[in-house]
Image: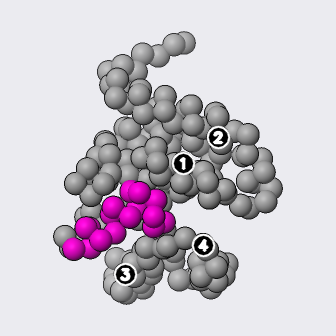
Amino acid sequence: MDMNYSQYFTEDHESIRSLAREFAEKSLAPIAKEVDENDHFPEALIKEMAELGFFGLKIPEEYGGLGLDMRSYVCVMEELSRKCPVASIFVSSANSLGSGPLLLYGTDAQKEKYLPAIAEGEALAYLIAPPLEAMYGVDAALKAADVRLCVLYAPPSETNFGGGLL
């Protein structure tokens, strides 16, 4: 059964989907097995995803992002995940875990400082819960990473279950 989704997806959605599909097929599919086997994602592909704007999909244009909607984000995530799920984690981290709290609760100064760096791929943003940090040695991995990290700390509160790194 062929479904018509044109009522949900515009030409802009299909355009970003096509861009993501082309990238995934050309750049991700050939290395996906190696990524899974070696637990290493090539930095060159992180840079390429940044250049394509994938890290700033939901970040407003005023902060260096593309300012696209959730459907555009989902189109990209779906296409990347089909070929290499690990790639989608980088995109999700930038567009949700990294920029989301800043967009919702950050000061103008914080937004101006961090969002352009996230959108451009100059800073990788992650959400790390303290128990996982201790269990998996995330702290050591982050210190050894050859990238600039944007790490925000959420002080303990009733809503974040005792604090954590954002």
Colouring rule applied to residues: one colour
Q: Which of 161 and 91 is in front in this view?
A: 91
Residue at the (33%, 61%) spot, across then down: 116
Residue 29 lies, in percent from the top left, at 69, 39
Q: What element carries label 2?
A: helix
Numbered badge on residue 101? none
Residue 123 sits inside the magenta stretch: yes
Q: Which of the two labelled residues, at mark 2 and mark 1, occupies the earlier sequence position?
A: 2
Q: Which of marks 3 and 4 is nearer the N terminus?
A: 4
Evaluate whether residue 64 shows in this view: yes
Alpha carbons under labels 2 and 3: distance apart = 36 Å
**Residue 38 in picture, x, y percent from top left:** 79, 60
How far apart marks 4 and 1 lie (CA) works out to 16 Å
| Residue at numbered disc 1 | 48
Of labels 2 and 3, the one closer to you? 2
Which disc is residue 154 wearing? 3
**Residue to which mark 2 is pinned:** 27
User: In screen coordinates, is 4 left or right of 46?
Assistant: left
Pointer 2 or 3: first along the chain: 2
Mark 4 secondary-structure assignment: loop
**Circle 4 sits on which residue?**
146
In magenta segment, residue 134: no
- Residue 27 versus residue 15 in the image, above or below: below
User: Who comes first in sequence, dot 4 or dot 1?
Assistant: 1
